[in-house]
Image (cartoon, rainbow, N blue to C red):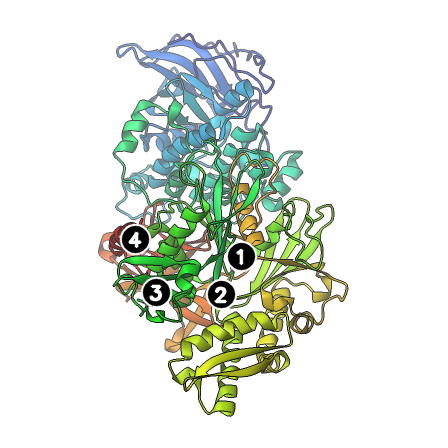
Amino acid sequence: MPEPSSSKLIPHVDEPPTCDGGGESSGDFSELDLSGSALFDSSGHKAATVTEDHSEPMPEQLGDYALKEKLGSGGMGQVFLAEHVRMQRTVALKMLPGQLMKDQQAVDRFYEEIRAASRVLHPNIVAAFDAGEDHGIHYLAMEYVDGMTLTNMVATRGPLSVGEAASIIRQASMGLLHAHRAGIIHRDVKPGNIMRSKDGTVKVLDLGLARISTAGLTTRHPAVLAAQKADSATKDIVNARPAKGRLVGTLSFMSPEQLEDADTADSRSDIYSLGATMYFLLTGQPPFTGEYLEQVYGHRHGEIPDLMQVRRDVDMQFANLFRRMMAKKPHARYTSLDEVIEDLGEYADKTNEPQWLAEFALRQPIGEGSTFVGGSTSAHIANVLAFDMGMFYAAAAEASPQGGVNTLYAGGEKRPLFRMSIGSDANQLFFGDEAMKRRATHSKSLVHCLPMYIGKQFVERPIAGQKCPPEVLLALLLKRLARNAWHLEGTPAAVAITVPSSYDQLHRQSILQAAQMAGLKTVRLIDRSVAAAQSLLLPPVAESARSEVAMTSLDTSTDQNILFLGLTGQGTDAAVFHRDASRMKQISTAGHWHTGTLPWMQRLVDMAAATFQKNHGVDPRKSTQAPRLQIACETAMHSLMLMPTTKVTLEIGGVEQTVTLVRSEWLQACEDLVDGVRKAIKSACHYASLSRKRIDRIVTLGPLLRLNEIRSEILRGLNEQIVVQVVDRTDVARGAAACLASELPGRGSIAMPPQSVTSQTIGILVEAPQGRRRIMPIVPRGTALPARTNRRLTVGDTQETMALSLVETAGVKRDDWHSLGRYDFKIDPVAHGQESRYRMIGFEVNVNGMLIVRAQTPGMPGSTRLGTLPKPMLSEEEIATWTRWVDKFD
């Protein structure tokens, strides 16, 4: 072991003094370094030597410990390097400074710290070996750590890599989680209270401000039993804590609720402080700086720093992880540190971690895989693939985080669009245009418009002799899409798939299951409106002269309010965005997947059938001509986009007969559909709290919206001179690729990733008095993603089970609800007492729009991820079976 530094410590440069009452410093220095290395200030120079207090000379030995030299001092004690005379074990011996030896409250607090430290034993916590009194001196023998504090590490080396910071915070989380499970809240987590030893082990130290928390712990928990058996002096100390309104902790890393009342701080306060510590490791400064009041305001009201703007090597998932740790409200943070440990595991650089941790990790169960890009953000940068997958067609694009975004040939053979259809003849499959050619003669072995089947157990028409779930057929199409479009070496690092903003949990689950069976393991769902809006920030492509205005990149020098309006086969999509200098932000969404172009097509089919009935006495819908009528009307609909009339010809009674369809008559039959689109625009503006007159630009997607008769009616009430920009599927695919690439590290010139919001409200079904039921919203629509909240749910004294029923908004107007399912918890009052009658439930809607629910075990801070709701259409066993079937057609 190297010789320890002689009387060196860091003056408090980058952190204000630890406070414990009245906002005053509890000592000249707030940081103790129990290391064997020299200490440095924030500029990297050695700190000033601490002047020894010679008024009361220290003895050469205290109890069984021979004192060697002083390591440092702080408000609650001096620390000496010492050695146990018989065991010859080197320790850090902490003792009260001489002026506090006669202060009974200081002595009591010192022993409170000792009792707290003695209740935890974990590799990531500085161990307490012994305590005693000798020569009138109270001392604590602690583990000696051969390393340095995080403050010193950053002062010496500068900001750390993402992987190294994640590894350090992950280890610290392991130690703190162990303390939390013992009922101990640290309350002063900061870089100066975390050390890393030379073997890579991270140690949490200084439980001096920790308190025993019996809330939520069963009476059988050993830590609580020990606390209950503590002497009356301990109770006096607890009662003597600083009154409400006096700070306890270190301001630069203190949670907002700890600023209000230190005694209300719980494990989530430590999570906040740990997030602030991670920010320090990545930037070299706390998240909020300035004078005292500026820091207080920052913690309470300041905007959480965006790590993606601070560092280019941070991806969006890691930035969201940090934001969740530092959420202002405790209920919006992680429920427990076990969740933090799991999420940080994807980024932690294992290179410098101790061997014991690697061996420990091998014995741990593997957690659920992420649906997004895993691994360290410092990993290699690779191109990503994106699909805009609609009802009738799909487009593809690829992007590099350095800035390149290119359209791919989704249909193969230099065709930018892929027809979303699949057919079969025996075991031979046909895709796209080739499948559609067989439609008139082999309609019973052809499936198209697959998204409309989501929610059904099977598609009735068999493919390759099998009646398949729609997810399986979508998997076949996705696999063919990837084969057509992706020509780079290897598989894409990640794949983005667009979905209507209105898609609910069931629809999003089905798309993810289809992607899984297609072999696309890393998938990001992106709202189509978001991808379309982000495409405005891309350089125009050469063939974009189709728009009413030139396809030019959006001017980001001024703020703009943008309305996206999509009318496609998958539904009506309306969304309001605000674009400022930093990023595109979705504010609200409206529309529904039941209100797309299919009803418009059906009106045209009905009109043609009625005309044939009137002119020729035959309704083709009730004859063998039904498939031909559908095909002919699809062609006619495209013609009516260009001409006021068109003709439809069918074979009636062996003779070809023709009818004429008039665009004005068709649109008159669709007046209610036009009104529905107008209402979607009004709803989106209403939930954005924005007048339609304040919209600066409109982005439209879908051929119907190019018709002047439709567009002028739908956009009535907006500024007449407003810029209307038309995008198509290839633009949306490019926007989706840019969105995904912007979420990865090393973004280059790509714009910041857009922010999206929840499109549905998630709620809890609550039993009201007299047997009535009401719905309590948990995650309202329009909440920025990822959304997170925690709720404590309690049941009555006589109930033996707790049922948690979840619901989601549904219907075209989103004023109805449908059930997502329920969870049942067994109440065991014999084992856990009255504490078993509550559950702390964490609700999260992640960046894919998917709901994740966790339940906290009674008496423990850890949480368990509950099963997916609604129940997925396919089980994991069924997915494995169908994946093997899909792979047969490679």
Residues at marks 2 and 1 touching, judged by CB atoms closer than 8 Å: yes
Residue 595 shows in this picture: no
Q: Which amino acid does label 2 sit on?
A: Gln
Marks 4/3: CA distance?
30 Å
Residue drawn at (46%, 72%) of the image: 631
Mark 4 vs mark 1, foreground winner is 4
Residues at marks 4 and 1 touching, judged by CB atoms closer than 8 Å: no
Q: How many labels does the image show?
A: 4
Q: Check disc 3 and report the residue beneath it.
A: 821
Mark 1 vs mark 3, foreground winner is 1
Pinpoint residue 478: horizontal percent, then vertical percent. Answer: 40, 53
- Between 36 and 610, the one nearer to me in the picture: 610
The numbered disc on residue 886 is: 4
Marks 2/1: CA distance?
10 Å
2 or 1: tag closer to the N-terminus: 1
1 or 3: tag closer to the N-terminus: 1
Pinpoint residue 148: horizontal percent, then vertical percent. Answer: 46, 19
The answer to whether 555 appears left or right of 777 in the picture is right
The numbered disc on residue 528 is: 1
Marks 4/1: CA distance?
27 Å
Q: Check disc 2 and report the residue beneath it.
A: 570
Q: Which amino acid does label 1 sit on?
A: Arg
